Amino acid sequence: MSFNTISVVGLGYIGLPTAAMFASRKKKVIGVDVNQHAVDTINRGEIHIVEPELDMIVHAAVKEGYLKATHTPEQADAFLIAVPTPFKNSDSEIPEPDLSYIKAAAEAIAPVLKKGDLVILESTSPVGATEQMAEWLAEVRTDLTFPQQVGEESDIRIAHCPERVLPGHVVHELVENDRVIGGMTTMCSQAATELYKTFVEGECITTNTRTAEMAKLTENSFRDVNIAFANELSMICDKLDINVWELIKLANRHPRVNILQPGPGVGGHCIAVDPWFIVSKTPDEAKLIHTARTVNDAKPDWVINKVKLAIADFLQANPTKTAKDITIACYGLAFKADIDDLRESPALNIAQQIVEFHSGKVIAVEPNIKRLPNKINSLQLSKLELAKNTADIHLLLVDHREFKNNSLKNNYLIDTKGI
Ligand code: SAJ
């Protein structure tokens, strides 16, 4: 089987680096995205996301003619779908996955599919989503056969190959990480393996679609449960007057213990979302995974309570002052250390909540961002030195490297990351 032209649908944090990797191996790549700004930026050889080393690879791929972006799908030998899978009804007790982006992508590529093509779903998906995508394709293309209808003989091959790369390390992890390849049939798995071997140096391990879907959800749920354990320990230790970071360091000396780090909550668009895909499918069984989500989601409220206690302490020690006189500095707004991504960030959520209830000044230090997005107009960005010298209460929310080398010695310091 040969893949001369590869189409990647969805040019975000996963799709664009993946497209760039194929193009860097001299494959003709057609990137498809509904976002015109993304399409135009990529066609200029530039990138619309922040990811180390990606700009150079995209620039070279576009300049050499291996990568182009477009709004509408064109014919290709393989299609990779890397669109978002957020959840809907996020206010309900158990949010449900929203597959509408996958459906739209499937309907967009269906008209250009031809016999022999391979379609891969890369988006993190609830169990059964790949089979559902195959159904959507079959509904549009009644002239082609699909694996769910005729098995190995199908015209179109379909697989789920979840992405597992860590933001900030995408370029290396895409090449080096092992890859789980879940084909709807053995031939589907073989075709997908051959495609990924274009640039993947890790092992490609084959399985079925449902196991591949669950493997990805399991990895992120495992991390969520482990972080929830750390967060619960941090609240227990706070009550018992024990330094949780020292405690975890000591416990992790045991050869079979590896506890992650507590923080102000769990953010980003993966760990805080994917476990719900398991819980919403099997709510009666997924009790531990559900509880972990609840513990991590409640951590920002615990931090807010700490801030309120610090304000009360400050006022007691300074009886001539009122809350209006107190300046609170929040250190870090991103969802984790050394990145600029504010999406689903517990740090940002906490800072915004403080602005809402605190009558005094609230400033934020975020070294990775020059300007806050327009919709966040309640916060004032400040330089680190200024915040250190002028704030009365210091709230450390993200362990950015700039904060690690900069000790904050203050009676009113709330350090959620153990810096
Ligand atoms: N966090 C903690 N304590 C820790 C580690 C992380 O509180 O000890 C917090 C972070 O601050 C952040 C959140 O968890 O708010 C998530 O950060 P992360 O670094 O754990 O993960 P992501 O969301 O950047 O990337 C994860 C990765 N999954 C795993 O490590 C199992 C990545 O490999 C996946 O590809 C990615 O999700 C994804 O796309 O699903």
Image (cartoon, rainbow, N blue to C red):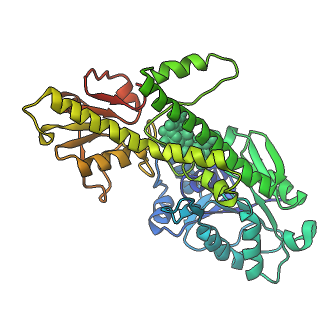
Where's the C terminus, which quadrant?
top left
Quadrant in which the N terminus is drawn = bottom right
Q: Nearer the viewer, residue 155 or 93?
A: 93
Within the image, what quadrant is residue 8 found in? bottom right
Quadrant position of residue 253: top right
Among the 4 quarters of the image, the one containing residue 66 = bottom right
The residue at the point 64 percent across, 75 percent down is 108
Residue 27 drawn above or below residue 224: below
Give coordinates of residue 51: x percent, y percent.
50, 45
Q: In x, y percent, where is residue 382?
A: 23, 39
Whether residue 340 is visible to the viewer of this picture, yes or no, is no
Up-down relation of residue 94 to residue 197 (above or below)? below
Relative depth, front residue between 184 and 115: 184
- The spot of residue 23 in percent (x, y) is 64, 53
Would residue 299 be found to the left or right of residue 30 on screen? Answer: left
Q: Residue at x 41, y 43 (%)?
A: 300
Q: Position of residue 125 (x, y in %)?
A: 67, 58
Q: Is residue 336 left or right of residue 371?
A: right
Residue drawn 65% across the image and 48% down it: 287
Q: Quick check: 97 above or below 395? A: below
Ligand 1 is in which quadrant of the figure?
A: top right
Which residue is nearer to you in this view: 87 or 130?
Answer: 87
Which of 126 and 193 lies nearest the eye of the viewer? 126
Query: In the image as oriented, which residue stretches furthest toward the left?
Result: 320
Count all numbered tags in the image, as a single digit.
0
**Is residue 173 something one can see in this rendering?**
yes
